[in-house]
Image (cartoon, grey):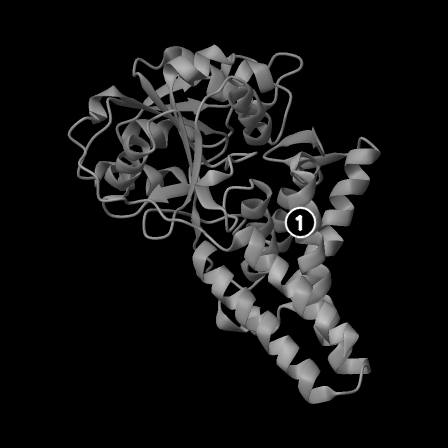
Amino acid sequence: MIALAVTLALWFAGWIVLGRVKRCGCGQSIQFVRAGLLSIIIPARNEEQNLPTLLRSLVAQSIRPREIIVVDDASTDRTAEVAREHGARVINSQPLPDGWRGKTWACHQGAQSATGDLLLFLDADTWFEADGLRRVLEEFQAAGGGVLSVAPHHAVRSFHEQFSAFFNLVMLAGTGAFTLRGDSLAPRGLLGQFMLIERAAYQRVGGHEAVKGRILENFWLAEQLRAAGVPLRCRGGQEVFSFRMYPQSWREVVDGWTKGFASGAGQTPLPILLLVVAWMFGLMTAPLGLAFGGQSLLWLAAYGLGAGQVAWLLRRVGTFHWSTALLYPAPLVFYFVVFARSVSRARNQQTVAWKGRQVHAD
């Protein structure tokens, strides 16, 4: 009975760290936020397959930005041509300087070229849902400006993508923005796929140049912004902003999460990190207790609570199949294996092949 009680206590840790995934869309008037002030910056390397979805979604929005800039990061495909065909202004990236990562260098060049007072950095594998841009600008206005980061809702369409389940959950938990305390606890990180920021705040902290060598630049930039007193807000992107992450293959899933996830754990506030670890430990004890612990009905009930909780949380981060929650130990073990790989490679300064470059696991 003690083991069951401990399992239930650890299960509750999941609600503490992810109990309030607040969405965009506060219903405020947009009359004081003019889209003409907005520059959208999209760093893109070999993104000819993804860019059309994002750019078409921007054309379909009820409001239009001042400009859409695609920074072509030495692509070897038709990224630049596709961007121009869809009405974006294309900047050809200069050669990557020593000490920079490809994405931070591309974002830096895009920001230098942009003319708007608001800068919106987007990953190329994302897209807006109907009227999503208006809703995020409303949310930004309601928050009083500063920085708004939105977690894209994961459009899961293939079997191997189901195994990103716990990476999505931990990515959100690691920001510290979705706890039961809500906005009363300032985020410790931002979501890397979407950052809307006032140009003045961006320049005040040195922009992407201040985090030029980081893979998870969103966490490190959040630290700079928080130290400068810039207000930070994070929101969930359900029905507003979506993406597909690593849709091509198992190899892409493994290498994509390997390249930076250990660093993300290192940037997670210690109380949040301990709660996440405790929660995952509790999720694993339920199936182990069911298999080896006796009192099968009680352990089955504990397993059901864990599966129900995972299902509830996954609905807020993506379109995961119900069976992913029911069989949650499989994606959870996958998470442990890939995370261990990320830690090992970061510790040994090993590289991972990513978009035609060898990058050090951060």
Q: Is residue 122 left or right of residue 62?
A: right
At label 1, the amino acid type is: Val
Name the residue at 60% across, 49% down.
170
Inspect this view and state whether residue 165 appears: no
Name the residue at 39% across, 24% down.
146
Q: Position of residue 46 (x, y in %)?
A: 49, 33
Q: Nearer the viewer, residue 92 or 261?
A: 261
Name the residue at 20% across, 25% down.
34
Does residue 242 lie above or below 357 as drawn?
A: below
Q: Nearer the viewer, residue 76 or 240?
A: 240
Kindly indicate the quadrant of the structure image that contains residue 309: bottom right
Which quarter of the rendered picture does the N terminus lie within?
bottom right
Q: Position of residue 45 (x, y in %)?
A: 50, 30
Name the residue at 44% across, 40% down.
183
Q: Is residue 54 left or right of residue 346?
A: left
Q: Nearer the viewer, residue 273 or 170?
A: 273
Q: Is residue 110 left or right of residue 66?
A: right
- The extreme right residue here reads 348
Which quarter of the rendered picture does the C terminus lie within?
top right
Kindly indicate the quadrant of the structure image that contains residue 224: top right
Q: Nearer the viewer, residue 290 or 165?
A: 290
Task: Say which residue label 1 marks.
Answer: 254
| Marker count (numbered) | 1
Mark 1: few/some/many CA within 10 Å (<14, 14-19, 20+): many
Element at badge 1?
A: helix
Does residue 163 lie above or below 305 as drawn?
A: above
